[in-house]
Image (spheres, rainbow, N blue to C red):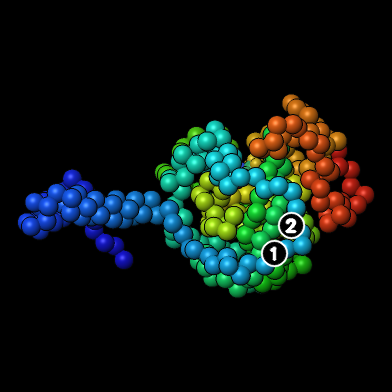
Amino acid sequence: MLIKIRNSSDLKDHDVTDLDDYYDRRSFIRSSFKYLTYGALANYGMMFNTSHASFDFTSAKKSTFSATEKLTSFESITSYNNFYELGSGKKDPKLNSHLLRTNPWTITVGGECNKPGTYNLEDFVNPHALEERIYRLRCVEAWSMVIPWLGIELSKVIKRFEPNSKAKFVQFESIYDPENLPGQKRRVLNWPYVEGLRIDEALNPLVILAVGLYGKDLLNQNGAPLRLVVPWKYGFKSIKSIVKIRFTDVQPKSAWNVSAPHEYGFYSNVNPNVDHPRWSQKRERRIGSFLKQKTQIFNGYAEEVAHLYKGMDLIKYF
Ligand code: MTE
């Protein structure tokens, strides 16, 4: 429902206070402030539609997959980001976060499955149990964090849409809104941002669709309202602000692979033995720690995922 909100400059004194109050300066300031604050908040929400569904995380289950390392601070997780749609500097996603419109939000599921459809965010998420998953996130740029995500297991979501026997891969697509997203006004990447997984990778129980972190709804800079988290792959596979999921019989495109195929492979499993052409992947800087630490094969999740790549040449399929 649309409600017309007046600009604060349109306000007359009699709009904000009665005459008695007018002479009571403290009260006048109080009531004006209240009115202006409500007006500003309502305007803000209407202009940008930045708030989305709020989830109840109080009963989110703790997971045995969770890491036990020291958590990266909320401040670092939400202010040091890669989200090129909101700018290419690390601080840009937070500074421009208000430009991402997350309400209303729908997710369209299609391709090789028996139950395609378009769902609003709540209907997409609510049939599934929320869990807390504390995961290491290793960026291809050789920094890392430990993040307490809240989300739903992707394998359970996939099963609900009944992929058919032709579904060999899953493709994910981010929001496309060049009018509002400053990064999409420039051809830094081929927009919209897309990513993909082999279906057996996508069905691995480690993969989640996150809707929150640190007990709160996901902030826009972290990929609100719904983003992928694949903890054994470089961070760019963990695509943000997802609007489409598609089951395919051919390997889908992925944004960084299209942009620089010799630097970013489709698989992009964390691997200290395969360097990036321009830097080493042997070590990483844990945000908040002074010394660098060794990078682990599959980001430390080998026990859960190494079987997916049995017999595969991980240098060729980087
Ligand atoms: N998803 C979209 N749509 N756009 C992006 O620019 N950056 C990726 C990934 N997902 C990116 C994205 C990269 S390079 C990383 S390291 C992670 O998001 C960073 O997630 P974070 O900012 O929540 O730590």
- Secondary structure at badge 1 equals strand
Whether 188 is drawn above or below 227: the answer is above
Residue 200 point in image, percent of width and height: 79, 59
The answer to whether mark 1 and mark 2 are in CB contact below 8 A is: yes
User: What is the quadrant of the N terminus in the image?
Assistant: bottom left
Residue 43 point in image, percent of width and height: 30, 52
Residue kind at label 1, given as amino acid type? Lys
Viewer-side residue, 76 vs 30: 30
Q: Which residue is mark 1?
A: 62
Q: Quadrant of ligand 1?
A: top right
Cβ of mark 1 under 8 Å from ligand 1: the answer is no
Residue kind at label 2, given as amino acid type? Ser
Which circle marks residue 66 in the picture?
2
Which residue appears at 65% of the width and 37% of the height?
Answer: 288
Residue 245 point in image, percent of width and height: 62, 59
Which residue appears at 65% of the width and 54% of the height?
Answer: 148
- Secondary structure at badge 2 equals loop
Outermost residue, right side = 311
Q: CA distance from mark 1 to mark 2?
A: 8 Å
For mark 1, does the 10 Å Cα neighbourhood hold few (<14), some (14 to 19), or many (20 or more) residues? few
Task: Say if residue 295 shows up in the picture.
Answer: yes
Whether 69 is drawn above or below 288: the answer is below
Which circle marks residue 98 in the picture?
none
Residue 242 point in image, percent of width and height: 57, 55
Which residue appears at 24% of the width and 50% of the height?
Answer: 33
Which residue appears at 61% of the width and 70% of the height?
Answer: 59
Whether 297 is drawn above or below 22: the answer is above
